[in-house]
Image: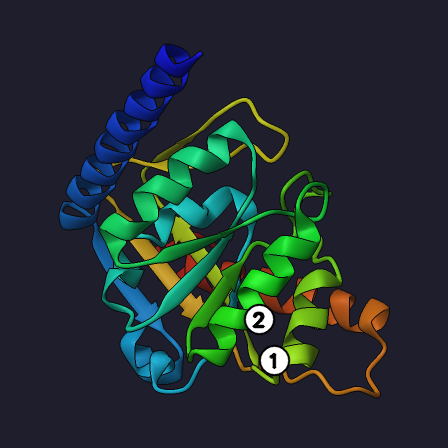
Amino acid sequence: MAYTEGFENVKYNIAACLISGYLRLCGILTKYKIEGLDGTIGKSAETPVIFAFWHNRQGFLLYPYRKHKKMCVLVSLSKDGEYIARALPKFNMIASRGSTTRGGAAAYRGLISKAKLGYSLALTPDGPRGPVYQASQGVLALARKTGFPIIPVGVYATNKFSVNSWDKFQVILPFGKCSIVLGKPLKVTREDNLRELSKDLTLRIQDATSQAAKLCGVK
């Protein structure tokens, strides 16, 4: 048992190093363009916010977000999530583990505690199992609790491939363009209807994604 656990630990660590190395290489060899909030990821970190982006494009964001001062990312408790959680520190980020289907309460408490320490939060509102491109109410409840505004994030890469997963997860390839659009902040109050607001957030992320595609020359 101890041998098996030790092997699994080594496997995850090696995979995290390979993932982070590959994404850094792609980041160096990719031409990034960022629009919104003065055009930089860093300036959006002057006060804590919640970044919301689609699950299948999260890999595009690790490299450009590496200079963010404080970032806590919600990562599922799945085996795939373990790879991501171990790769995050290599981009100066930390993970809060859990999802709406498993470990949600603990993850929510973890995000709240990091928010109190001044961390910005990052979530995929259509994860971990969809429906794809439809924002759930979880991120809105978190925004209401923390008082942080939600920043809808749209991202598009010209060089990529998709894997056979529920959301056709996209993996960036080098020598292309990648555009990131940070939409207008969305504030959530106690009076807001979260079900209706989730539709609004969906449209905001989709609009930011369309704008990112246009920046890459895609009509």
Residue 136 in the figure: left or right of residue 28: right
Give me the disc on residue 207.
none
Give me the disc on residue 112.
2
Q: Residue at the location (24% across, 26% down)?
A: 14
The quadrant holding residue 129 is top right
Q: Secondary structure at mark 2?
A: helix
Q: CA distance from mark 1 to mark 2?
A: 7 Å
Count the numbered circles shown.
Answer: 2
Above or below 138: residue 117? below
Quadrant location, the N terminus: top left
Rendered location of residue 82, percent (x, y): 44, 35
Name the kind of residue labelled 1 in the image. Answer: Thr
**Label 1 with label 2: CB-CB less than 8 Å:** yes
Give me the disc on residue 146.
1
- Of residues 119 and 52, the one drawn nearer to the viewer in this rendering: 119
Rendered location of residue 182, percent (x, y): 45, 72
